[in-house]
Amino acid sequence: MEPEDVMALVHPAIAVAVVFPIIGTVVNAAWQTRQRRLQVATGDKSKIPPTVGPEHLKLGRLLTGAIVGITLIALAYSIYFKSILEKNLWGKSPSQVVFIALMFAATIASLVFLYQARQRLWRGVFASLTGVGLVVLGFQDGVFRRDDEWLVSHFYYGIAAALLMVFSLAIAPEIYQDRSHGWRKIHTVLNCIALLLFLGQGVTGSRDLLEIPLSWQKEHVYQCDFKYKTCPKPAPKI
């Protein structure tokens, strides 16, 4: 495998080894938190420890960083290898390369500031900046999006899930301050949607790995007609 092929495995490897285990732990903590809340509300003595709520919040904040981080890694790989190197973007448009680098830096900085922000206004500002950064980077040349099949696109599922995670992080303080539980209901619904997107990520990511050829195979594989599923016949052996 060439270095490009090895780097292509970083994103899925982190997803399998780090992100999906965190998702499972967060879902389990969320379920326990809800069960304890319902038991206490009915006057029953719950066997679930009261620490499960803060633990769920802590893991949720960690999950947001992991999701945004792995998304940026995937985008960086695609933009660097498929655009900057393959299409010689630095030689053709160095200003665009500088812009991309600044967007990566700004997106990371916005996420860091979002973690530190306490006031609602600033949480909204930094969450918006983080989301805009992800979207702008996602629509750079070199990123494989499946625009014609966006309903089953690994890219669109991933961006949508990352945006939902950023929004969940931004509204976390409101959930604990809202006595009407309106924000809690919004949080629950959106994160159920995010969970479905994560499941879709597992399926579409596996599919895309099957379809992406190794670097030395590209010139041969891309001669195939993907619409009619045919490939040129190999030259006869002499």
Image (cartoon, grey):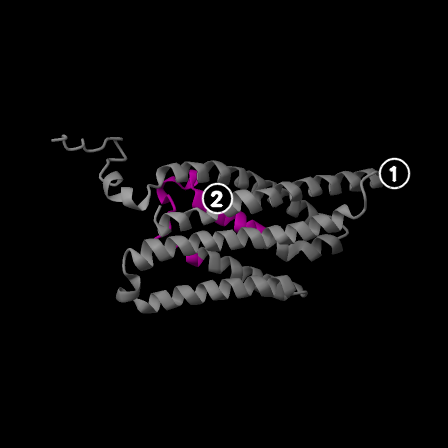
Q: Is residue 44 magenta?
A: no
Q: Is residue 47 left or right of residue 11?
A: right
Q: Is residue 66 left or right of residue 91?
A: right
Q: Nearer the viewer, residue 207 or 117?
A: 207
- Callout 2: few (<14), some (14-19), or many (20+) C-alpha neighbours within 10 Å? many
For the residue marked with disc 1, what is the amino acid? Lys
Highlighted range, magenta: 136-165
The image quadrant of residue 49 is: top right
Q: Position of residue 154 (x, y in %)?
A: 44, 43
- Callout 1: few (<14), some (14-19), or many (20+) C-alpha neighbours within 10 Å? few
Q: Is residue 160 left or right of residue 188?
A: left
Q: Main secondary structure of the magenta part?
A: helix
Of labels 1 and 2, earlier in sequence is 1
Of helix, strand and loop, which one carries label 2? helix
Residue that appears at 76% across and 46% down: 52
Q: Disc number at residue 157? A: 2
Residue pointed to by mark 1: 45
Q: Nearer the viewer, residue 182 or 175?
A: 175
